[in-house]
Amino acid sequence: MPGNADTLSLASGRPLVKSVGRLARARARDESLDDSTVRRFHQVALATDFTGRLYFLRGVIQLLRAERPPIGLDYGLLADDLRALATGDPHQRDSVLLRWGRDLHSLPESDSKERS
C-alpha cells in the first residue's frame, strides 16, 4: 500500500539529492557513485519540461524506496525545489539545478566530518 512505513521513508532535512547520493554510493562497486543511479538522476535534472521531470523523478523515488532499508528524503524540501523549478524563472531553476549538482557530488556527511 503506498504511503505505508515500509515504502515511504521521511528524513527531515535530507534533500532529494543527498538521498540519491547515498543510494549511488550504496549501489557502487567501489568508492565512486553508481553510474546507473547517477544517469537516472541526470534524467530528472535535464528534463526539458516539468511533466518529464516529474516522470523521471517518480523512477528515482521508486529506487530510493526499493533500497533495503529504504533511503528517506525530506518531501517538504523536494516540494520547495519543484515549486522553484515550475515557476519558469531561469534564475530559480539554475539555482536548484546547481545545488543539486553540488549535493550529488559532495562527500557524505560522515566522510566530510572525518576529513575535517
Image (cartoon, rainbow, N blue to C red):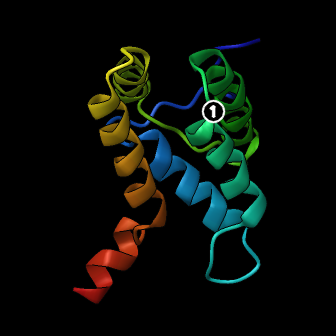
**At which x and y percent is residue 42?**
63, 48
Q: Which of these two is toward me, 88 or 106? A: 88
**At which x and y percent is residue 102?**
38, 59
**Amino acid of disc 1:** Ala
**At which x and y percent is residue 97?**
42, 43
User: The C terminus is located in which quarter?
Assistant: bottom left
Q: Secondary structure at mark 1?
A: loop
Q: Residue at x 78, y 58 (%)?
A: 36
Q: Which of these two is toward me, 108 or 7? A: 108
Residue for badge 1: 47
User: In the picture, residue 52 is in which quadrant?
Assistant: top right
User: The N terminus is located in which quarter?
Assistant: top right
Q: Residue at x 76, y 78 (%)?
A: 29
User: In the picture, residue 58 is in which quadrant?
Assistant: top right
Q: Residue at x 66, y 41 (%)?
A: 64
Viewed as shown, does residue 35 lie left or right of 21?
right
Q: Which of these two is toward me, 91 or 67? A: 91
Q: Which of these two is toward me, 98 or 21? A: 98
Viewed as shown, does residue 79 lie left or right of 33?
left
Q: Residue at x 37, y 72 (%)?
A: 110
Viewed as shown, does residue 32 lie left or right of 96?
right
- The vertical placement of 33 against 47, above or below, is below
Give the residue at the far bottom of this rendering. 115
